[in-house]
Amino acid sequence: MYSGFMSTPERLIESTRELLWERGYVGTSPKAILERSGAGQGSMYHHFKGKPDLALAAIRRTAQEMRATAEGVLSGPGTPYERVEAYLRRERDVLRGCPVGRLTMDPDVIADDALRAPVDETLDWLRARLAEIVEEGKERGEFAPSLDGGEIAAAVVATVQGGYVLARASGSPTAFDAAVRGLLALLAPPEDRTR
C-alpha cells in the first residue's frame, strides 16, 4: 500500500490519518494502524509514546496539509471575491467530508486538549485568513463596506463544513454545491448578482 521508500514512522502517521478520517479516534485501534501501515508489532511504541502521541502527529499533519491547500488557493491570482470563490469551489471529496472538520465531531478528540489544539488552530487560521481577504475586498470596493470580515469568514467556513454534513446525509454532493452557490450569490458584487 505504501512506497518502500516511506519510513516506518511515516507509514504509521499516514495510516493513522486515513483511519481517523474513516473511523474516528476510538475506531482507530493500534491493531488497525499496524495492519494498514504494514509495520511490525511494537513499531508504534518504538517511534511514538502510544496511540495518543501518534494520533497527535497524524492530526497535525492533516491540519498542516489542509492549511497549505487552502493557502494555495487563497493566495492565488484574482480579486478577493475570485479567491474566496476559488476556495469554495476547489475540488474536494465532498462525500468523505473534511478530515479536520470531522475531528470536531469526535468526542475523544474534543475532550483532549492536545488532540483538539491543531484542529482549533487550523480553523482559527482559516477564519482569520478569509477575514483578511474580505477586508481587502472591502478596501477595493468589491465587497459592501458594511460587511464584517470575521463574520463573513465564519459564514464561509460554516458553509463548507455544513455543506459536507448535508452532502454526506443525502449521499450526494448536490447539497454542498447548492450551499456554495447560495453563499457566492450573497457575496457577489451588486453588478454581478443579475448574472
Image: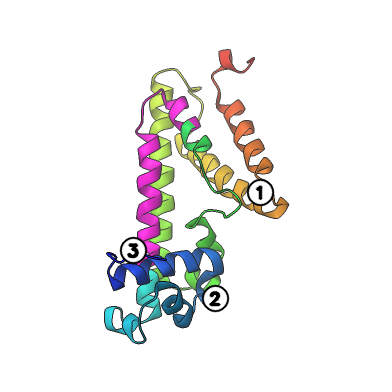
The residue stretch that appears in magenta: 57-85
Give how far across and how far down residue 172 sits, in percent: 68, 47
Amino acid type, mark 2? Gly
Amino acid type, mark 3? Ser
Colouring convention used in this rendered image of the protein: rainbow
Give how far across and how far down residue 78 sits, in percent: 39, 23
- Please check the rendered image and state whether residue 61 is part of the magenta-colored stretch, yes or no: yes
167 is higher (above) or lower (below) than 51: above
Q: Which residue is at 36% across, 78% downward? A: 39
Q: Which residue is at 66% across, 53% downward? A: 168
Q: Nearer the viewer, residue 147 or 68?
A: 68
Outermost residue, bottom direction?
42
Q: CA distance from mark 3 to mark 1?
A: 33 Å
Task: Bin the neighbour count of mark 2 within 10 Å (Cα to Cα): few under 14, some 14-19, many 20 and up.
Answer: few
Q: CA distance from mark 2 to mark 3?
A: 25 Å
Outermost residue, right direction?
170
Q: Nearer the viewer, residue 48 or 186?
A: 48
Q: Secondary structure at mark 2?
A: helix
Q: Quadrant of residue 59?
A: bottom left
Count how many numbered circles sit on residues in the image.
Answer: 3
Q: Which residue carries the number 2 mark?
A: 27
Q: Which residue is at 44% across, 17% downward? A: 141
Give how far across and how far down residue 135 sits, in percent: 40, 29
Q: Which residue carries the number 1 mark?
A: 167
Image disc number at residue 3? 3
Give how far across and how far down residue 192 sits, in percent: 57, 16
